Image (cartoon, helix red, strand yellow):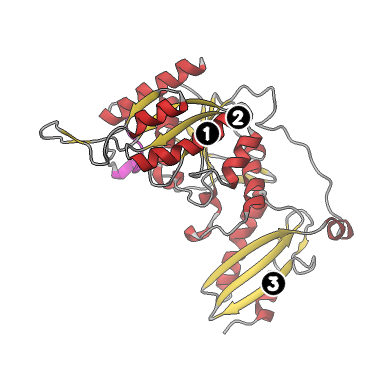
């Protein structure tokens, strides 16, 4: 049975990345709870929501598991200003931001009213289609509680982190960053809203994106903390609203569209996913989730229908596995090509 003394002993080897001192020495180990070899920790750092914190999170989980823990739960908080000063805290550094006014990147947020409508599938295929059109594209998996973009794109490696800079993973010509890269063994994310806002801000400011034409943001469904943060951070953002033909999905998607309108974001259009099933044998269409939801949503938001995506699955290549990305010449891939042609036409880029 693990003891608190054992946990504290192994944590002496973990340094606060900014203070360069053990988190035990800084008083950063705020809480240790042990139940049946399941360990729960609260850790305080000089800075939270940084690339270094994400690396540290992985190290702590591994070192405590090596000591005998079955599972490790982590919560983070920030040392107060007085503690940081007393410990010889670092001066703040200014870095160039993706959010600076002179950055020419076009931000496109992909949003929906509810989960399960295929918003992330739309995000990755819009991103890869834009890349196929010769554009420089990045994608932020901002669905921080329900991250799925790395798995959808078949990404197995993790970003390189050097100092305070994160280098995104590139796949299919798209630069990708996701919370999923920094969570051990698909563990649940238990951060609260303010911490998530810091993480999202660091995805903009601490990632070395290079030159981009478009940055796609796969938002969480609904109008919660992360969506609000995006609307605050990005005054010039464009939005795609994803729904299914079902009346309820369209009804709740209207809320996400209304938030965009209220915050002066431009709605590029509606994408109706899972619109129908088309038989390969007969070519006959079956409208499994009904009809009309997308059209009603376009009328309510006073925008246009950019595309209707049928139910389907990409061709699986075991050598180059990407379970949710359609090839450009796949029938559904061609629909995405038409959607991105219209997006580029509307944006003028």
Q: Residue 1 placed where, x, y %?
A: 57, 85
Q: Which of marks 1 and 2 is nearer the N terminus?
A: 2
Q: On the image, which quarter does residue 343 sit in? A: top left
| Element under disc 1 | helix
What's drawn in magenta, residue-wise? 318-327
Against 273, residue 47 (above or below) is below
**Depth check: 296 or 288 in front?**
296
Q: Residue 109 placed where, x, y %?
A: 52, 33
Q: Residue 85 placed where, x, y %?
A: 88, 56
Mark 1 closeness class: few <14, some 14–19, many ≥20 residues within 10 Å? some
Pointer 2 residue = 210
Against 8, residue 226 (above or below) is above
Query: Looking at the magenta stretch, what is its main secondary structure?
Result: loop
Q: Earlier in the sequence, mark 2 or mark 3?
A: 3
Q: Is residue 297 magenta?
A: no
* Residue at 65% across, 36% down: 232
Pointer 3 residue = 31
**Depth check: 79 or 278 in front?**
278
Pointer 1 residue = 258
């Amino acid at each position: 049975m693990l003891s608190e003394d054992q946990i504290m002993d192994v944590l002496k080897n973990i340094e606060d990345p900014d203070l360069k001192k053990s988190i035990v020495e800084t008083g950063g180990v705020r809480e240790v709870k042990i139940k049946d070899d399941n360990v729960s920790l609260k850790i305080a750092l000089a800075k939270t929501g940084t690339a270094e914190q994400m690396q540290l999170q992985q190290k702590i989980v591994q070192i405590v598991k090596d000591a005998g823990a079955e599972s490790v739960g982590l919560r983070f908080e920030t040392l107060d200003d007085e503690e940081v000063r007393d410990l010889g805290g670092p001066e703040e550094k200014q870095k160039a931001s993706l959010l600076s006014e002179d950055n020419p990147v076009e931000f496109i947020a992909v949003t929906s009213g509810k989960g399960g409508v295929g918003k992330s599938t739309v995000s990755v295929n819009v991103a890869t289609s834009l890349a196929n059109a010769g554009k420089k594209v990045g994608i932020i998996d901002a669905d921080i509680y329900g991250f799925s973009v790395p798995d959808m794109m078949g990404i197995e490696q993790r970003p390189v982190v050097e100092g305070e800079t994160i280098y995104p993973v590139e796949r299919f010509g798209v630069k990708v960053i996701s919370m999923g890269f920094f969570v051990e063994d698909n563990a649940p994310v238990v951060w609260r809203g303010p911490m998530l806002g810091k993480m999202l801000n660091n995805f903009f400011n601490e990632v070395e994106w290079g030159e981009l034409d478009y940055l796609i943001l796969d938002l969480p469904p609904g109008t919660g903390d992360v969506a609000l943060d995006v609307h605050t951070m990005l005054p010039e953002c464009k939005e795609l609203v994803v729904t299914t033909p079902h009346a309820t999905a369209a009804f709740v998607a209207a809320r996400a569209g209304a938030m965009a309108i209220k915050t002066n974001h431009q709605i590029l259009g509606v994408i109706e996913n899972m619109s129908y099933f088309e038989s390969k044998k007969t070519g006959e269409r079956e409208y499994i989730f009904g009809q009309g939801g997308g059209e009603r949503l376009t009328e309510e938001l006073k925008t246009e229908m950019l595309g209707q995506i049928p139910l389907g699955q990409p061709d699986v290549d075991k050598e180059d596995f990407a379970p949710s990305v359609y090839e450009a010449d796949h029938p559904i891939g061609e629909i995405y090509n038409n959607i991105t042609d219209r997006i580029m036409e509307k944006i003028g880029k």
